Amino acid sequence: MAITLKANQRKDLKQSVTRELRHEGNVPGVVYGKDKEPVNVAVNSLELLKTVRDEGKNAIISLDIDEGSTVNVMLHEYQIDPLKDELIHADFYIVNMSEEMDVEVPVRLEGEAAGAKEGGVVQQPLYDLAIRAKPGDIPEEIVVDVSELNIGDAVMVGDLKESRKYEITEDENTTIVSVTPPEEMPEEPDLDNADAEPERVGEEADDEGSDNEENSENDDK
């Protein structure tokens, strides 16, 4: 089910007008799609962020433009001001609800790995899974249960259960999560021999040299 979000069409694209929109709590954006003319819009920044937070980044949004033309879109890209941490621009892509599309879905681990209780380290190389599905069948996330994983075990993409609603396009040999052995602790220094007197190689060589000279003098006599 699509989430309705109101939008106003932007006809004046001057920077001063855009700044005023942001000051009022709105974010400028553009709506575009296949064989569709781009439309400049503005939406409430907080409502958009709440929608993405609650429904996920692949949420289907029913964008009501000027309370007349309604289109189903997905938030394709967005820009955030790194200094103010505010949303400053959004791109909405018009989707066809009857056509499949390629997207990436977040992967969430569930449970505590058995190997982790023994000191193993849980590693997750893959955080987003590539799938193909109709917009209405895109899951919010893919959940992977790791509770049965022991040290040395791993879950690959090929281990995931098949779904009738979407097709996994990720390489089946890609590792999603693994439990590796605990890191070996560095060996402690041998304190018993730490205070031992080091071998005086140079002095022994000098002693041998002195003995040889003394023997040579005795032979001459």
Image (cartoon, grey):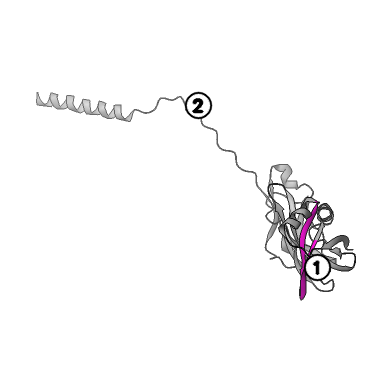
> Split into 4 quadrants, where in the image is the C terminus?
top left
Looking at the picture, tell me which residue is in the foreground, 180 or 99.
99
Q: Residue at x 81, y 51 (%)?
A: 25
* Residue segment shown in magenta: 24-41
Left or right of 185 in this view: 73: right
| Rendering coords of residue 182 (x, y %) | 65, 44
Q: Amino acid at mark 2?
A: Asp
Q: Which mark is residue 192?
A: 2
Q: Residue furthest bottom?
A: 35
Residue 66 lies, in percent from the top left, at: 87, 64
Residue found at the very far left of the displayed protein: 221
Q: Is residue 108 visible?
A: no
Give the answer, above or below, for where 108 lies relative to 9: above
Question: Who is closer to the viewer here, 40 or 80?
Answer: 40
Viewer-side label of 2, 1: 1
Residue 74 picture location, percent across and down: 80, 64
Residue at x-position 82% and y-position 52%: 46
Q: Is residue 34 magenta?
A: yes
Residue at the spot x=77%, y=63% of the render?
A: 12
| Residue 81 appears in the picture as rendered | yes
Q: Position of residue 204 (x, y in %)?
A: 29, 28
N-terminal label among 2 and 1? 1
What residue is shown with label 1? 166
